Amino acid sequence: MPRRELFLGVDAGSSVCKAALFDGAGRLIAVAAQPTPLLRLGARVEVDPAQVWAAAVAVLRQMVEPSSTARSFQSSRLCA
């Protein structure tokens, strides 16, 4: 099987961590998202870096696991 060039984008925002996988032609293959809870401390709002990391790991796992909940836009299996 020939190798495909794939590009992964990750947006670790303050309320949700998102990832999108594209092929070499720029076509969207899959997307996934995981919420990252905000910590409200009186008038301040913070994000726990450990929860952001956990959300990033979760969306990346969704991208590579064949039985994941990531929305797949092509019927191809992703291989590392």
Image (spheres, grey):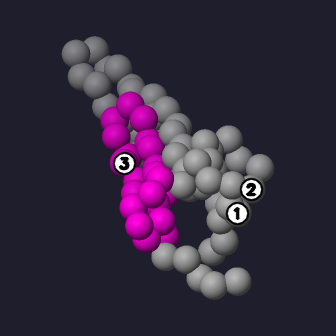
Residue 2 appears at what percent x and percent y?
63, 84
* Local SS, label 3: strand
**Looking at the picture, which amino acid does disc 3 mark?**
Asp
Seen from this angle, which residue lies furthest bottom? Answer: 2
Q: Distance of mark 3 from mark 2, alpha carbons?
A: 22 Å
Q: Which numbered mark, 3 or 2, is in the foreground of this view? A: 2
Which quadrant would the N terminus be assigned to in this image?
bottom right
Inspect the magenta stretch and tell me whether residue 26 lies in it: yes
Question: Disc 3 designates what residue?
Answer: 11
The dominant secondary structure in magenta is strand
What residue is rendered at 61% in x and 42% in y? 71
Residue 66: which disc? 2
Determine crowd level at label 3: few under 14, some 14-19, many 20+ residues with C-alpha closer than 10 A.
few
**Looking at the picture, which amino acid does disc 2 mark?**
Pro
- Residue 27 seen: yes
Residue 23 appears at what percent x and percent y?
48, 65
Inspect the magenta stretch and tell me whether residue 10 lies in it: yes
Residue 77: which disc? 1
**Extent of the magenta region:** 6-28
Seen from this angle, which residue lies furthest left? Answer: 43
Q: Which numbered mark, 3 or 1, is in the foreground of this view? A: 1
Of callouts 3 and 2, the N-terminal one? 3
* Local SS, label 2: loop
Q: Are marks 2 and 1 in contact (CB under 8 Å)?
A: yes
Q: Quadrant of residue 26?
A: bottom left
* Local SS, label 1: loop
Of callouts 3 and 1, the N-terminal one? 3
Q: Which numbered mark, 2 or 1, is in the foreground of this view? A: 1
What residue is rendered at 40% in x and 57% in y? 9
Determine crowd level at label 1: few under 14, some 14-19, many 20+ residues with C-alpha closer than 10 A.
few
